[in-house]
Image: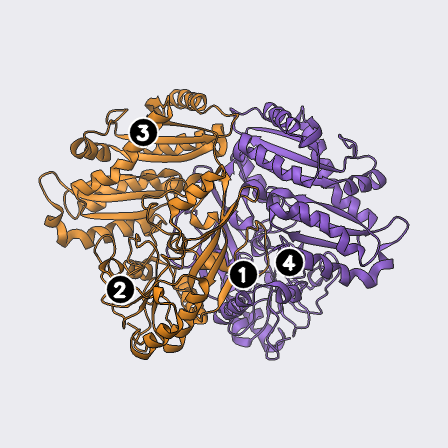
Chain colours: A purple, B orange
Amino acid sequence: MTSDLTAATGPFADDLRSKLPAATFRDMEARYLEEPRGRWAGTDGLLLAPATTEEVSLIVTAAAKARVAVIPYGGGTGLVGGQVSADLPAPVILSLERMTKVHKVDATENALTVEAGVILQHVQEAAEAVDRLFPLTIAAQGSARIGGILSTNAGGVNVLRYGNARDLCLGLEAVMPDGSILNGLSPLRKNNTGYDLRHLLIGAEGTLGIITAATLKLLPRPAKTGAAMMAIRDPQAALELLNMARAQIGEGVSAFELIGKTGMDFLAETMPEVRLPLGNPDWSVLIDLGLGASGDPAQALEDLFATAHEAGLVTDGVIAQSEQQRREFWQVRESIPEGNRRIGSVSSHDISVPTASIPDFIKDGPGVIGRIGDFRINCFGHVGDGNLHYNVFPMPGRARADHDSEREAIKTAVHDLVHAYGGSVSAEHGVGRLKVGDLERYVDPTKLAAMRAIKAGLDPAGIMNPGAVLRCAV
Amino acid sequence: MTSDLTAATGPFADDLRSKLPAATFRDMEARYLEEPRGRWAGTDGLLLAPATTEEVSLIVTAAAKARVAVIPYGGGTGLVGGQVSADLPAPVILSLERMTKVHKVDATENALTVEAGVILQHVQEAAEAVDRLFPLTIAAQGSARIGGILSTNAGGVNVLRYGNARDLCLGLEAVMPDGSILNGLSPLRKNNTGYDLRHLLIGAEGTLGIITAATLKLLPRPAKTGAAMMAIRDPQAALELLNMARAQIGEGVSAFELIGKTGMDFLAETMPEVRLPLGNPDWSVLIDLGLGASGDPAQALEDLFATAHEAGLVTDGVIAQSEQQRREFWQVRESIPEGNRRIGSVSSHDISVPTASIPDFIKDGPGVIGRIGDFRINCFGHVGDGNLHYNVFPMPGRARADHDSEREAIKTAVHDLVHAYGGSVSAEHGVGRLKVGDLERYVDPTKLAAMRAIKAGLDPAGIMNPGAVLRCAV
């Protein structure tokens, strides 16, 4: 807790009431003070929903003067408590929910500009309406807003081909911690005029300013899509198969997802309605292709299967013969998180390791967890990015509550193993308030010192999302 | 000039001599004090060529204590004077030329790690040796070093497909302005643990630290390549053709270069040995494809030509029937800068505009320049990135020296026009010392203020490449 922050009450709030339209002021609701997993709860705050960037600027300028904390709030879907104030004098909760304009969709430029409150799915739809693709795809796309997506540098299943959120952002508008407006909306692909503030604000989780609008990259919509599920020899074969696929098919490989037997077992147990096209092999992959009009995805996948089978990488496979069947394959992959929820994990981990280390990491995991107790492990995820969801479950007949006392030890064991492999303890969810300690434990001290210097330089009053990413100075 | 910097002489130099191997100290040569176009010349300095990151750290630590300026020096190919000290007490010229180790080339990981002094061409060769591609391609690749390439965020002809230097960098090691070592070498594709210092150092032109090593992204080598030259209706047709090509062929379009009649005229005049496959149309494009093993580039280009001809976008075309012919097409494109040199430009500009604005920008250019005098304009470049090389030449019979007094006015007219279209006055070369004034004129003031705050936070003594990018505080 920062000792010299003040609460968003009294004259501060009265002054804003005199300057901003009444619609800016909303009644506080529980959802603004909670996060999806119920780990954090804010206590109170002044909920403001400005309609324009100028109003955001006015609020932040006032907050900087009064040393009032400002917590930016997007769709509220973040999983690390970045959007929830804790241990602060009542902050401003600044919701972008009224800034939902789509300014410009330009198919020739392959770019669109949207306000930060636009929901991801609406961006996808706006792109589709001009026959373009905005490829970012995450589970929360129906409620996550672009400002939060960029602030946390969201990932998802198509990172292999299209990159993370930062790779899909061409320009930003933001309100800086002193209330000034950074005018960086631009579709330029090449612009070497000074430090790249866009990439600094992306992933800063609202601690260096509030993203108010963004120019995003559009891509050609693949004219032909295809998918296959293949049972593979082992995780090492997944890596070799991916490199083989990219050599044969180039960038047309849109997703390449690893699925383990445990995940399929959970589906069979909890969601028997989900058809498992390959039965339940030890390891399998879902490969998704998107090709241009001259491509032939089914043929490309058949050729890949033939070469990979010859090389001993795959033991079985099925290639989608229709869009309906492709969706069926994806349903398997997308049902795994729900299967996990129904079983009830003791601990879940959003981690990444160098892709070449995935097989060894998967081999070592049961050993380090086995030293704590008997558990089931469901490891699945985005092989091409080294991003695994690594979830630990009770043995059959036990409940997650039986293992409350072991949760912290499991987390540390997994994170230590990830760190030993040069991996990251937050691959896509960010740091928020949940992983501030992990950052201090695992991140290079020079990086932490530079982050603190940047934070102090840009936000000397320490008002922007205090306590997220970096611990508050006491 | 910063008033409180001191010269790299006397006790400061003596102290370093006692701590560093003799091989670190090199005799000053003219080339370290000049830049390729002869616009800037440093006066003097202490030339140091450390062999390790620890030695770089030792030098910078000493410089920070003594307030001695440090100018990082890579291949010396920069075109904006970022590598040349001017108006400073004798600085340390810190050359990375002895740090040329290729640490790790990993085809499974699709990554390699190199020291900052490695020459770009050697990176390309190291990638090729493991059947991978490092796609960055620039004219100076035989002498430019990776540290400088990343510090200036170099571009080149393949940005359309593969991005700028920053998009090809996965991790960085750097020595920060206080001498501490940032350990960020990592091949991770997904890592959301705090501010992205990599993207801050990339493009900072050595003003926030010295890049000492980098982990770079490798890509599949396209199994099949192809190229075509097509005469197009006008610049607008180039945009439509590019979008058509990407819809039909997907990401397989590696380069898409616009060439104007003036450039071809210059070639015919100064380099008649260069064969012009389409003769000399008003506007043409060079399209380069790289496809996976299952692709058929010649067929894809024929299909594209047919559709584009039908749509009235192209009037003539020739498709390479061999790798030899593809190289011939590229020779046309790559000879244009040499043709320009032989004619002798009055003024040349590395600019970008939103791609959709290219046709209007090209239409408006002659008007604003015509108000200054009679000139020939050679406009060519990377259409997909909006990055044009926009060069202004004397009329036949006149020499560039005849127009010395108009150069500044031309530069301002072009830059003002670029700015009016929301473009950038430095698309790929950076700011260096040449464009500090342009930055102040054209860049968003909030961005400039934030850059200064970051610089002050990370380099409070102001020793790192003072006067580059940001004007020294007096």
Image coordinates of residue A422 in percent, x first then y, are 61, 55
- Nearer to the camera, B118 or A263: B118
* Residue neighbourhood size for the residue with mark 3, other residues' Cα within 10 Å, grouped as few (<14), some (14–19), many (≥20): many
Quarter of the image where one finds residue B450: bottom left
- Nearer to the camera, B377 or B252: B252
Give yes or no for contact between labels 1 and 4 (Cβ–Cβ under 8 Å): no
Determine the secondary structure under disc 2: loop
Instruction: Kindly report the distance in space between the C-alpha atoms of the residues bearing marks 3 and 2.
Output: 44 Å
**Nearer mark to the viewer, of 1 and 2:** 2
Quarter of the N terminus of chain B within the rendering = bottom left
Q: Which residue does the numbered mark 4 point to in the structure image?
A: A419
Q: Residue at x 35, y 49 (%)?
A: B428
What's the amino acid at mark 2?
A: Asp
**Nearer mark to the viewer, of 1 and 4:** 4
Determine the secondary structure under disc 4: helix
Image coordinates of residue B165 in percent, x first then y, are 43, 49
Picture disc at residue B27:
2
Give yes or no for contact between labels 1 and 2 (Cβ–Cβ under 8 Å): no
In this rendering, do the residues under marks 4 and 2 share a single chain? no
What's the amino acid at mark 3?
A: Phe
Determine the secondary structure under disc 1: loop
Q: Residue furthest left?
A: B397
Q: Which residue does the numbered mark 3 point to in the structure image?
A: B329
